[in-house]
Image (spheres, helix red, strand yellow):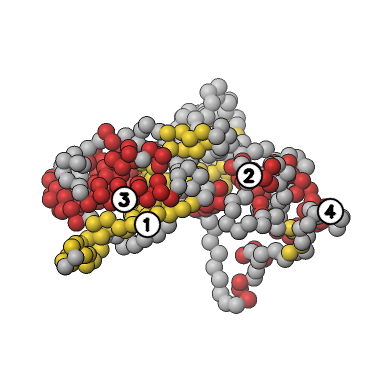
């Protein structure tokens, strides 16, 4: 029998083989792992649904495979096909991905070559205003390589629907076939923006092409969706972290005796959670479908972790209920799992607020991008010694920490973000061992 790749989870239908755990001639048991598969931001094992002898392996490391595709053939050891197991194949753990819309049969993916230079209209007329379209429409457009700024919307306010995308694709296909297509009234044809696919870079010198790994594809897609669908604003400030640094130095040795490395991040997490309780709008999610703001009465922080494969964001749950020691230990464990690609999808879901601390790298101010469906993210830079005026006639050298709060402007106004930042700066500057539970 042929063992086929099962459906991997909600909205997930493919992955990349990172390890083949058996070889031809091996005798395997039911539920024995046969593959390791990378999908979205998680790596999971695929078990065999039946026992038998591996007669043939159809895939190799690096292959991208889809649900329903044969991965190996099994015999019963006597050269006859092994019977199919009655139990379903277990799914590999994956990060949850939203279900993708079904593309109508008459609509094929649009290749750049079917977009004639003089026939593709630009619809968006207001620079900086996000295109009005649902996440489903945006995802479909991204999958098909369609620029939504060129799609006229039929709904009030120019909102783009799936029907609008389908009509636009049919228009492009008609143009590619040499047939006349109706142009929207009042829209002038323009030349397309050059894309890397349309340019031969080798004409200017040597080049090297490297396939984008699945994790980078996921990061690119999600950040593009975030940036194009959420009106980002970033509030910048600095906090005097001298007291915080003092606590770190004071308690670092005691933590090491318990096998835990104390860093600035868990201390800052305790400061942030105290401020979020005063400003709950930044610990919420916006539902456009119901026009409701969902306030979360839990504090689950996504913590950005830099890995060789890309940025991963495991979630630390119930930050307000845990001690600094517990947070430091959990952060260390999650960061190690992230670097080894052993995080499960569940460990990267359910965040209510995200912190990205680039202090260890040496960065200063930067603009972090919101992690939907959250509405805010805090970027933290490296603390640096600076001369600070304390009184009219006194200057001291203090450790100043750069802070950057990016937030969804549909949910919060500048005044609310300013108040959040003022309170966060004050909390950091006035921190004591008691306030963070040390």
Q: Residue at x 79, y 53 (%)?
A: 184
Callout 3: few (<14), some (14-19), or many (20+) C-alpha neighbours within 10 Å?
some
Location of residue 398 in the rendering, given as x and y in whole percent from the top left corner: 20, 62
Mark identifier at residue 422? 3
Left or right of 325? Residue 115 is right
User: At numbered mark 3, what does the secondary structure look like: helix, strand or loop?
Assistant: helix
When asked about the image quadrant of residue 333, the answer is top left
Identify the residue position indicated by label 1 in the image: 236
- Reply above or below: 93 against 175: above
- Reply above or below: 60 against 102: below
Quarter holding the C terminus?
top left
Sequence-wise first label, 4 or 1:
4
Location of residue 393 in the rendering, given as x and y in whole percent from the top left corner: 16, 67
Whether residue 214 appears in this view of the structure is: no
Mark identifier at residue 176? none
Q: Nearer the viewer, residue 116 or 274?
A: 274
Which is more foreground, mark 3 or mark 1?
3
User: At numbered mark 1, what does the secondary structure look like: helix, strand or loop?
Assistant: strand
Left or right of 266? Residue 108 is right
């Amino acid at each position: 029998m042929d063992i086929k790749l099962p459906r991997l989870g909600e909205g997930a239908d493919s992955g990349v083989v990172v390890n083949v755990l058996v070889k031809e001639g091996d005798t395997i048991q039911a539920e024995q792992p046969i593959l390791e598969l990378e999908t979205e931001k998680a790596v999971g094992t695929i078990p065999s649904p039946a026992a038998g002898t591996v007669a043939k392996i159809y895939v190799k490391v690096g292959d991208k495979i889809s649900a329903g595709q044969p991965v190996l053939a099994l015999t019963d050891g006597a050269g006859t096909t092994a019977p199919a197991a009655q139990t379903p194949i277990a799914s590999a753990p994956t990060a949850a991905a939203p279900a993708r819309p079904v593309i109508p049969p008459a609509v094929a993916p649009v290749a750049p070559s079917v977009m004639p230079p003089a026939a593709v209209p630009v619809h968006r007329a207001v620079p900086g205003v996000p295109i009005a379209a649902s996440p489903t429409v945006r995802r479909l457009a991204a999958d098909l390589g369609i620029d939504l700024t060129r799609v006229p919307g039929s709904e009030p306010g120019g909102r783009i629907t799936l029907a609008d995308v389908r009509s636009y694709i049919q228009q492009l296909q008609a143009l590619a076939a040499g047939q006349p297509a109706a142009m929207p009234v009042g829209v002038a044809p323009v030349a397309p923006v050059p894309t890397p696919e349309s340019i031969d870079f080798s004409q200017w010198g040597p080049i090297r092409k490297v396939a984008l790994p699945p994790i980078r594809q996921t990061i690119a897609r999600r950040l593009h969706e975030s940036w194009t669908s959420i009106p980002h604003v970033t509030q910048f400030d600095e906090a005097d972290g001298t007291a915080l640094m003092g606590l770190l130095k004071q308690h670092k040795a005691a933590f090491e005796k318990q096998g835990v490395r104390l860093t600035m991040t868990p201390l800052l997490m305790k400061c942030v959670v105290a401020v979020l309780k005063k400003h709950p709008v930044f610990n919420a999610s916006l539902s456009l479908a119901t026009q409701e703001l969902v306030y979360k009465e839990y504090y689950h922080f996504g913590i950005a972790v830099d890995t060789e494969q890309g940025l991963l964001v495991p979630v630390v749950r119930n930050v307000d209920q845990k001690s600094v020691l517990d947070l430091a230990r959990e952060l260390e464990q999650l960061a190690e799992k992230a670097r080894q690609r052993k995080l499960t999808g569940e460990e990267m879901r359910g965040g209510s607020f995200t912190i990205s601390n680039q202090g260890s790298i040496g960065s200063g101010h930067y603009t972090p991008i919101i992690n939907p469906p959250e509405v805010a993210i805090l970027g933290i830079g490296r603390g640096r010694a600076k001369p600070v005026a304390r009184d009219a006639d006194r200057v001291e050298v203090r450790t100043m920490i750069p802070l950057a709060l990016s937030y969804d402007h549909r949910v919060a106004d500048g005044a609310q973000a300013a108040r959040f930042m003022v309170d966060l700066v004050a909390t950091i500057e006035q921190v004591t061992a008691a306030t963070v539970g040390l």
